[in-house]
């Protein structure tokens, strides 16, 4: 593809290759020619874009976009598997209605999972922010420690994680070993004990799911110029003050980004009970694939709503900061 | 950390030159370091060890004899390491109809094909998304973002319909094609190619380079770290993927290693003896991932730092 070998740089500009240029007797003619050539150039430029995009687009359309659309279509149907193949009966929003009215497992699972997530997301964010703050300091062996914290990103995806948890590596043996559960219950009272224990049992997940977040935060710290800190120090601010007045406000967009990332990560988590329920419903004769699709789409819609809220809060916070300056 | 350094200085009678230099460097650092830094390192080391715990557990589990595997509460460290688990695994797999090497061969072919095609498709797409003008660019970007959030289980049936409609069941294509349109890979590539200065590409164009030339001679060499990252991510996904083997292929000779291992362990999950084979399998499946990570780790962190955001 050597599309632009002759006439490049300025589209419709002065670089016409000799010979194809009209004699230049009438200005209007020249203009028209120019415009046509410009359009040709643009089309070639765009054409290259499409050509390079093509393999990905085909793959995406055939094996991602179409199946997703198909599952949306299925969610409005009752799908039956018969010897002749799939049978679709249009039922409208019936599947969605049934998910909320008839299904006594789904809505409860959804709510409990969301409660857990609402606890986990801030914890992961705070933990990764804290650790990245520490990792941003200078000390010997920093690269090694960074690599260790990044390690889970490689393993904490799908199959490996499943395998590890099946093997029992996800549990913390010391919780059982030292009877930590009883200790917590005795000391803080039942009401506070419940969430504390839930978090403790999820400690490994919190640690393992903050790898990318830590990295994003470290990248974020690097965008704050050092000169600001120096200036503030000369003005007599303590490190504590400079953290609250400079570091934290500058990190707001990154916190938002990380929140989005964490939500996406947790909601496509392999042991998610909601996904299990969807999968279980897929091949049940009573409910079928149409119903399972509806469940998946409800779930998807809720995630999108949550993401929209997070993005809106981040946007507001960032705007407020800009207004203050 | 500081204390160990002083101990090493005091007690070492005949240190190697290298370790001596290390120790003296640590010693010098200790003099400058504040208490804050010492506690910082101790704290980070502790959390770091904690993060490594599941991996240590996995390694130890594979070498535990049967009686230790069923200890309650479970222990992390193995007391009497044995190779018995691996022996059992190989004996068990030798009894199969399709030889073990066939699964291995399939896995190698599938992983190589997928890596190549994903890297090609995503670098090409990333290049034009970052450096070219054409219609629907924002639409494509938002599609990528949206498809990141979609759990793959929900679309498995329509995908099967597509794969079988295209007549690809029981071929290697059925393993490879579902991965090609990887949203993560394109996103990372686009972000990374954005960093390549436009001036470089313009200069090449002025000297008469075509798009293909720019792509192969300028873009590809510059984005090597991103290619490494995508290789790791894709390798991970493909190597452990079972969807291709369980859904899109019926012939036993077309299935991959991941499927074979899981079928080994699935049948044995309930039996007591199966636990030892499962533990050995888990380690064997895990090691290639670890090697990939150790090879490309630095490049990957670099990519993430440069392209994750901004």
Image (spheres, grey):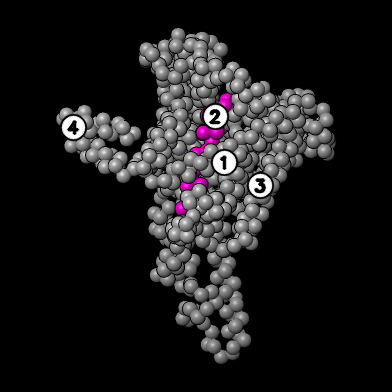
Viewer-side label of 3, 1: 1
> Judging from the image, what secondary structure is the residue with disc 4 in?
loop
Co-location on one chain, circles 4 and 2: no
Residue at mark 2: A203
CA–CA distance between discs 2 and 3? 24 Å
Q: What label sits on residue A125 in the rendered view?
A: 1
Co-location on one chain, circles 2 and 3: yes
Crowding at dot 2, Cα within 10 Å, few <14 / some 14-19 / many 20+, comes out as: many
For this orientation, the residue located farthest to the bottom is: A25
Tag 3 subunit:
A
Co-location on one chain, circles 3 and 1: yes
- Magenta range is A200-223
Using the rendered image of the protein, determine whether residue A132 is visible from the camera's viewpoint: yes
4 and 2 marks in contact (CB < 8 Å): no
Locate residue B105: give its quadrant. Answer: top left
Vertical placement of residue A7 versus B196, above or below: below
CA–CA distance between discs 3 and 1? 13 Å
For this orientation, the residue located farthest to the left is: B14
Co-location on one chain, circles 1 and 2: yes
x, y (%) of residue B257? 47, 27
Crowding at dot 4, Cα within 10 Å, few <14 / some 14-19 / many 20+, comes out as: few
Q: Along the horizontal axis of the image, is B97 left or right of A201? A: left
Co-location on one chain, circles 4 and 1: no
Using the image as rendered, state which of residue B155 and residue B286 is in the foreground: B286
> Judging from the image, what secondary structure is the residue with disc 2 in?
helix
Residue at mark 4: B15
């Amino acid at each position: 593809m050597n599309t632009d070998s002759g006439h490049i740089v300025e589209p419709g500009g002065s670089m016409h290759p000799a010979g194809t240029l009209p004699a230049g007797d009438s200005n209007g003619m020249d203009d028209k020619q120019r415009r046509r050539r410009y359009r040709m150039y643009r089309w070639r430029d765009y054409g290259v874009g499409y050509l390079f995009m093509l393999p990905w687009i085909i793959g995406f359309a055939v094996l991602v976009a179409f199946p997703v659309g198909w599952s949306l279509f299925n969610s409005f149907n009752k799908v039956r598997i018969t010897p002749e193949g799939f049978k679709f009966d249009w039922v409208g929003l019936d599947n969605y209605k049934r998910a909320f009215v008839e299904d006594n497992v789904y809505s409860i699972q959804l709510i409990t999972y969301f409660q857990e997530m609402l606890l986990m997301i801030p914890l992961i964010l705070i933990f990764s922010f804290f650790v990245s703050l520490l990792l941003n300091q200078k000390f010997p062996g920093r690269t090694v420690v960074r690599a260790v914290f990044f390690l889970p990103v490689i393993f904490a995806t799908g199959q490996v994680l499943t395998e590890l948890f099946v093997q029992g590596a996800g549990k913390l043996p010391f919780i059982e070993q030292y009877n930590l559960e009883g200790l917590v219950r005795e000391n803080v009272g039942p009401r506070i004990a419940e969430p504390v224990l839930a978090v403790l049992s999820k400690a490994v997940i919190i640690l393992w799911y903050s790898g990318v977040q830590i990295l994003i935060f470290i990248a974020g710290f690097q965008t704050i110029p050092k000169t600001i800190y120096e200036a503030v120090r000369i003005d007599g601010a303590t490190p504590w003050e400079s953290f609250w007045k400079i570091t934290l406000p500058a990190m707001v967009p990154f916190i938002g980004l990380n929140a989005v990332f964490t939500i996406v990560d947790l909601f496509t988590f392999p042991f998610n009970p909601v996904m299990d329920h969807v999968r279980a419903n897929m091949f049940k004769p009573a409910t079928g694939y149409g119903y399972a699709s509806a469940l998946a789409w409800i779930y998807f819609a809720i995630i999108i709503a949550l993401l929209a809220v997070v993005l809106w809060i981040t946007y507001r916070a960032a705007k407020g900061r800009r207004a203050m300056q | 950390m500081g204390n160990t350094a002083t101990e090493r200085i005091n007690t070492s009678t005949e240190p190697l030159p290298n370790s001596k230099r290390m120790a003296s460097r640590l010693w010098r650092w200790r003099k400058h370091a504040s208490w804050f830094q010492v506690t910082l390192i101790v704290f980070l080391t502790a959390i770091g060890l904690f993060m490594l715990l599941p991996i240590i557990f996995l390694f130890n589990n594979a070498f535990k004899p049967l009686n230790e595997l069923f200890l309650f509460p479970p222990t992390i460290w193995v007391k009497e390491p044995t190779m018995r688990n691996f022996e059992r695994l190989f004996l068990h797999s030798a009894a199969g109809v399709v030889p073990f090497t066939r699964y291995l061969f399939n896995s190698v072919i599938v992983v190589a094909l997928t890596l190549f095609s994903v890297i090609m498709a995503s670098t090409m797409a990333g290049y034009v998304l970052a450096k070219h003008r054409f219609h629907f660019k924002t639409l494509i970007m938002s599609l990528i973002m949206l498809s990141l959030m979609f759990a793959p289980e929900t679309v498995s049936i329509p995908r099967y319909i597509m794969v079988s409609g295209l007549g690809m069941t029981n071929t290697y294509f059925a393993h490879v094609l579902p991965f090609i349109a990887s949203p993560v890979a394109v996103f990372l590539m686009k972000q990374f190619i954005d960093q390549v200065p436009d001036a470089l590409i313009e200069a090449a164009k002025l000297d008469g380079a075509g798009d293909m030339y720019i792509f192969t001679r300028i873009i590809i060499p510059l984005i090597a770290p991103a290619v490494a990252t995508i290789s790791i991510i894709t390798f991970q996904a493909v190597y452990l993927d079972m969807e291709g083997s369980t859904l899109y292929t019926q012939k036993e000779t077309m299935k991959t290693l991941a499927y074979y291992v899981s079928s080994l362990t699935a049948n044995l999950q309930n039996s007591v003896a199966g636990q030892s084979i499962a533990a050995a399998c888990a380690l064997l499946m895990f090691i290639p991932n670890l090697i990939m990570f150790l090879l490309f780790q630095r490049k990957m962190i670099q990519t993430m730092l440069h392209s994750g955001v901004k």
